[in-house]
Amino acid sequence: MDISDDGQSLDPQWLDVNNNVCGVVQGCRGAAPVAAAFVRAGWSSRSSSWHGYEVETSWGQIELDPIETREVLLNGVIAPQRLDDLAGLLSRCGLRFTLELSDDSGALVREIRA
């Protein structure tokens, strides 16, 4: 398990925002390696279920939940202008992924596949 309290807490301006990011990380043995990638990038991490993690920094709070198909579901809140930063973090770790950013009404604003 990768648990770390070293990262920053979510900025209060994002506390009341509905989930605006979701995605899938492909080809993973579980959520722990993905959480470890976030911890190495300075995010905090805590267990959120038997096999899931919540990772957090000042501009995002994301749930990581493994599914049986060797994929990890990702959903949570990020500062919309930081979507490229999130994609960059996953790319630098060599992870394949799809990210979707939605607006306040739930409409798709942007999608990134790598």
Image (spheres, rainbow, N blue to C red):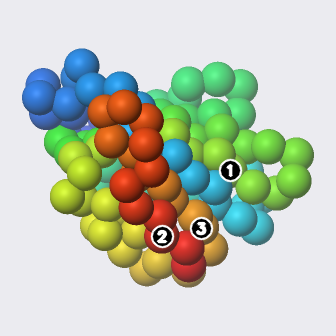
Please give the residue where the numbered disc 2 appears in the rendered image: 112
Q: CA distance from mark 3 to mark 1?
A: 9 Å
User: Which mark identifies residue 52?
Assistant: none
Residue behind mark 1: 72
The location of residue 17, given as percent across then percent down, is: 27, 26
Mark 2 or 1, closer to the camera: 2
Marks 2 and 1, the one that precedes in the sequence: 1
SS for callout 3: strand
**Image position, residue 30 (x, y; %):** 73, 51
Who comes first in sequence, dot 3 or dot 1?
1
Q: Position of residue 15 (x, y in %)?
A: 23, 23
**Disc 1 secondary structure class:** strand
Q: Is 99 placed above or below 7 here? A: below
Q: Amino acid at mark 2?
A: Ile
Asked if labels 3 and 2 touch by Cβ distance under 8 angstroms, the answer is: yes
Query: Label 3: which residue?
Result: 97
